[in-house]
Structure formats: structure tokens, C-alpha cells
Amino acid sequence: MSFRRFNLIAVSIAAVLSAATTQARPGPSPEQPFGGAAKSVSNGQSSSKSSPKKVVTLKAVSVKSRFISAKGHSALKMDVSARDTPFSISTYTGAFMHAVEATKVAELYPYMTGIQSAGITGYDLVFRGFQSGANDQNSILVDGLPGLATRFGSPATIGISRIDVVRGPSSVLNGEEQPGGFVNLITKKPEPYPLYELSSTVTTYDGAGVGIGDRPGLDFAADLTGPLDKDKRFLYRLIMEDSDKDTYRHSSYDRNVYFAPSLTWNISDRTSLTAAYQYQHLHYSYDTYLVAPDSNINLVAPITTRYQEPSDYEKEHGSVLSLFFNHNFGNGISWNIDTRDVWHTDQAHGFDVTAIRPDLLHVARRARGQINRRRYDYVDTNLHIPFDTFGISHKTVIGLTAGRDTLDANRLQFFNAPAKGPESLDISIYDPVYGQVPALSDLPLVANGSAKLLTDRYSVTESYGVYFADMMSLSEHWKATLGLRYARNHESIVERRVAGVPRNSKTNGKFLPMYGLVYQPNKHWSYYASYSTSYVPPAANAIDIHGVNSFVPTWASQIEAGSKANFMDGHLSATLALFRINEKNTFSHFPCAYGTCYQQLGKARSQGAEFEVNARPVDNWQLTAGYSYTDARITASTTPVQVNSRLPDVPYNSAHVWSRYDFTNASLEGLGFGVGVIYNGERQGFSPTKVGVPMLRLPAYTRVDTALYYSRGPYVVTFKVENLFDKTYYQSAGFNGDINLLPGTPRMFTLSVRAYFQ
């Protein structure tokens, strides 16, 4: 079946059910609240409480809404409480996004337990010790399906109602997942009540030698939703954002256009169909970031240093079409069909840093031109069936998934320059001088004798899966969960430009189980234990040192145990989790003549503990905090020096806290403040390859953020200072270790103004 027909199938099914439905969907009564729409801004959930008639106040949007919701939908693909699931999960709400004043999802990761940002693409994460990258589109899902609109830029928060984080292997319900877990971005959908949010944001820096007025940034956004007809059968939502920022890096900029309309058709009282479109265009400076000579962090140049030419750039744009169909048969039985189709193109035009020269004063560069075209087509359909047997209550989901990924990676230029002579592209590490080399268009496309490196690889991956999960209430105090998936995928890759390269194809399949047990002695405590699995076939375009894909899938299993607490009528909740993950056929990557090569080392293990708390002692004060201890190591390897070495970019200890307090006395009404602290311990930059080779170690750091809030009527003003003490730190070693070192942002000021209208 053609994947391009999935959307038409969903529409046709919806139309048939609509014609068969005799009872029209009643519109909400005039008494139904605007407050439900107000809460959708903060956490994407509806409310049944009454609300103000004219405006949405700061308290309705930000303070009285929880930072972390008690829901846990993404863990089992069903609406159950987080305390009923045998896994560690967190649902971060819109209130949390506004409190931290994050315009991109990546800005929230430091305040999420167990997650580290680990590179320059939107997919680069370290999750419970295991790293995901640009080839792992399943590490960040959107409405439960893979495929971001853009590959390098992090998703914009303006279009997201909540963020579900599920920790640990989750392949049983979601397919090809890395063992550390996944992030699920739940997008905003049309609401039946009018709500209009307008915002403008200004950013600037005051640190690392950059002055307040040097590199300002502007961001304008709008979020409009409501009914199109008086019966509220047709609902719309329109989200737009336009940003133009100069970053703290030398001659560096970031331009972003985001446009996301959606439409919901309430076909009947039991059937609905939502169609959503998203377009995003990014244009930014090409940047491979810093280098660490001799793998010594003390020899790194100032964080503003850039080794690309001012004219080097990268562009990408993506279009996404999603459909969400739901039909309720009655008695709690429901049917869902979700589809996601992504068209994406990115273009690179610039100089790659490929190595540090032996003098430790210069870097080698490559003239690079490339166009990548990607297509993702996914569908998930599932049936929810509640039933009882012999006094046991069941909540069961049965589903099918299918997906097709295509990638056309077309190298237009791949010139590895010599170290000396007129064609050298070397540049100084500490005092780079720009404009001393020819333009890319005047350089050779490839070095002599290296024509095989000018490739055009076209790969196709087709994946299929059938799954089920059953959450059973065995008694008043005991719950059990069982799940099973059969996953199968077929990969093929063909070289379109270089002659003589054979087509490479392979098929993989596996059964994946999960099970868990929850004991709830009372309404305050839950104790759980679980076993879960993950499965990741090698990316179709991953090659070894010989230029071929010789890899087998990675497989992992996790044992997890923990407890969840809920006190003060939900005003205090906490989760403690202990875990051990064992992975087989672990991957590692390294620079090579082809650009990037991969190898399978053997085995890896990550074990540790996580603790997260969300508290609201009083209505106008709440905080979220988390701590994680992670010991992630290679336990078996074909390279002996790697055995027992730590996995890259994984600190033993990391912690965070964000607290917000709003004054209630008359003289300070509307005023509030927030404080955040982030700590990351020392990390290893890459896996060792030879005995005696220096190891890159990223030092521990503590970052402090602060914010002031003021609300009056429909207006909310936020002033945030990120990295208050202008701490120099390095967030990760990136994809290529000591030649791809990502610095943290210096002190940055953000001023935003939002207005909410009915």
C-alpha cells in the first residue's frame, strides 16, 4: 500500500462514519467556560470550571497550572494516571514553558530529569546515559509519531501544549526507540472557545565579550483559536512565529519562520477529525563550534570563536501534514488513526572542521556543499477496549504502525584540503582571519583521486509493527501491565553517482516484550517494578570504514523499580526510580575519509537513580526539582581500551530546580519572580580509541537563571536572565568529540510581552 494514501484513507473512513451517524454533535452550552481554553495555553487540557468573561490572567495561565501534570498518556498510549504506570514519566505543561521562558524545546532540557542536550541537531540527546542523534528520528516524537519538520533547529514551543517524557526502553508501543527513553511533543489543537495569544520577545547578550546592544534578537508570535460556526462543529487554530536573531558566536545568526494552521471537524458526538499543517523555514550560519587541542579543555579558544567564513550558511525547510481521527463506539471503546507526513530539505554551504593540526594552533577544513532531502510517512491506528474478566478490570490497546523513510543525501562538494600549499584551507585556532581562502565555488569539488567521496546515496527504510498493551486492575491495591510488539523493517541503499557500488539491503525483525507491576497501599503511594525492551535497526546510510553498511540492530532491556508519592491533594508529587539498562551491539562513530564512519563496539550498560519532585506549597508558589545519578559504561568492545570506559557526555551527577513565586498582597499584586539552578557533573567527551591517547573531559558546571514576571489585565511581561553569573561552560562534546565542542550560552537577557484575549 502506498504511504501517500494514508491521509486519504483516514478522511474516507471519517466521511463514512459521519454519514452513518444519525445524532449530530451538540455544541457546548453558553455556560461552558473560557477557562478551558485558557488552560490549553498552559497544559493543553480542558477545564470544566467557570472563567472570566474578558481576559485570561497570569494566575490562570501560569501559576495555578501545574508544572508537571499527573497524566501519563504517552507511556501506554492510554489515558491513565502517571501513578498507575510502572515507568518513570513526566508531563511538562505550558505553564512550565512560560515560567522558564523557553521559545525552543531544547531550552527546557536542562530542567528535565535525566536528559542532556548532546549536539547541534534537534535530535541530539543523552537520555539515561544513551545518546541519540540525527539518524534517530524516534527519539523525539510529535503526537506519538516520528519526524520533526526541521533536522537541526529545535522545535518551537509556541505550537506545543505539553511535553511528555518517558524514561527507559519503549519500543513495545513506539517502535524503534533508543534505550534511554523518548520525548513526545503534543501539539496544540483547535479549541471550542475563542482565545487569542500575541507575543513579542527581545533577546540580547551581556557576556563573553558581547555587549548588550551588540546582537539583539526579535521574535513575534501569535496563537489564535476558536469555533468557525455557532454549533462549534468546525474549530480552527492558527499559530505563527517569525524570529530574527544574531547569536553570540562570531558573524552568526538564526532566522526562523513557523506557520501552523489546523482544523477540527466534529463530525458527530462520537467522531472527530483534525487536520494540521506545519511549515518551518530556518536560515542560519554554518557552524561546527569549538575545538579542544590535545583534548585539553584548558586550550579551548573563547566561546565566540568560529572557524567558518562569515558567508557560510545552512538552510532547511520542512512541511508536515498530520491527521487525527477518533471514533467512540460507546462503552469506552474507541478507535484512533493518526498519520504524519513530512517533507524536509536541508542545504549546507560552508567549511567543515575535520582535524586539529599537530602544531595545536590550526585546524584543517573541508569545503562542503550538500543537499539532503528527506521524506517521512507514518501511520498508527489503534483500538482501545476496556473490559472485565473474573473481577479483573482491563484497559487494552491494540495497534498497528507502518512507516517509510527516504533520504537522498547528495554531496555537491567534498574537498579535503591539503595542509600546505595554495589550496590549504587551514585557519588559526586562536586568531582566525577570514577571507583568506577562495570562495567555495572557486575550489575543486573533490580532491584528486577522491572521486568516490562525491556521493549521492539514496536510502529507503520501511518499518511495520503490531502491538498490544493491557493494564489490569487486579484489586484495589494491585495493577499489572503486559505488552508485546512484533517489529519488522527493511532497509535499502543505492549509490546514484559513484559507479560500481552495489545496492545494499537487509531485513530485520524482532519480538519485544514488556511487563510491570504496581502496588498502591493507599492513595498517596505507588510502588512499581517493570521490565521493558528497545530495538533500533542501524540507519540505512550508516557506513563502516570500508564504506558499507555491515551492521546489525541494537537491542536493550531495562529493569526498573521505584515509587511515586502524591500528597497535599496533589500539591506535592514525587517519583524515585532505580534502573539498569543493558544494550547489545552498541554503536560508536568517528571521523573518517567518508565524513563519518560507524562501528559496533559490543555491549554497554547504564545504571542509576532519578528523583523528581513537583510541589505547590501554596497557590502562588510552586517548584520542580530533579536529580539523577547515571553510571553509563562500555562493558564489552572489539577495542579493548574501551572496556569499562564511560559513555560520552554522561555526567555521574546532574540536578536542577526551578521555583516561581507570585506575590498576593495588594501593593505587589501581579508581580512574581523565578529562580533556576542547573548542575552537571564532569563528563567524558568521547570513547577512547587507542592506549595513551589524551581524553577530553568536560568540567562540571553550575548555571543560575532568574526571571521577573508582571501581569496586569490580559498582559504578561517576563524578564529573564539566563546564566546570571556569565559562567563559561560546555554543554557537550557534540557529534565529533574534540572538534565539535558546544559551549553554553553566555549571560543572556530575554524580555517578552504576551497578551491573552477572548
Image (cartoon, rainbow, N blue to C red):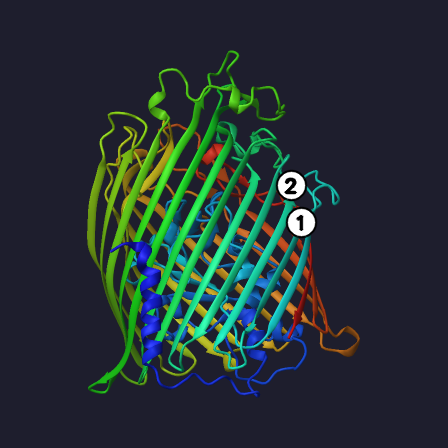
**Circle 2/circle 1 CB separation < 8 Å:** yes
Expressed as whole percent of the image width and height from the top left, the position of residue 274 reads 43, 68
Residue 436 versus residue 291 in the image, above or below = above
Q: Nearer the viewer, residue 333 or 184?
A: 333
Looking at the picture, which amino acid does disc 1 mark?
A: Met
Q: Nearer the viewer, residue 133 or 137?
A: 137
Q: Earlier in the sequence, mark 2 or mark 1?
A: 2
* Quadrant for the N terminus in the image: bottom left
Q: Residue at x 35, y 29 (%)?
A: 455
Give the CA separation, mark 2 to mark 1: 9 Å
Q: Is residue 394 visible?
A: no
Disc 1 is placed on an element classified as strand
Expressed as whole percent of the image width and height from the top left, the position of residue 20 reads 31, 80
Looking at the picture, which amino acid does disc 2 mark?
A: Tyr
Residue 269 versus residue 413 in the image, above or below = below
Label 1 packing within 10 angstroms: few (<14), some (14-19), many (20+): many
Determine which of the numbered discs, if any, sits on residue 248 in the image: 2
Quadrant of the image occupied by residue 503: top left
Disc 2 is placed on an element classified as loop
Q: Residue at x 20, y 46 (%)?
A: 507
* Quadrant for the C terminus in the image: bottom right
Expressed as whole percent of the image width and height from the top left, the position of residue 424 reads 51, 17
Q: Is residue 139 visible?
A: yes
Residue 172 versus residue 117 in the image, above or below = below
Q: Residue at x 51, y 55 (%)?
A: 109
Which residue lies most toward the right here?
667
Q: Nearer the viewer, residue 391 or 194?
A: 194
Determine which of the numbered discs, if any, sits on residue 748 in the image: 1
Expressed as whole percent of the image width and height from the top left, the position of residue 414 reads 43, 26
Label 2 packing within 10 angstroms: few (<14), some (14-19), many (20+): many
Which residue lies most toward the front here?
19
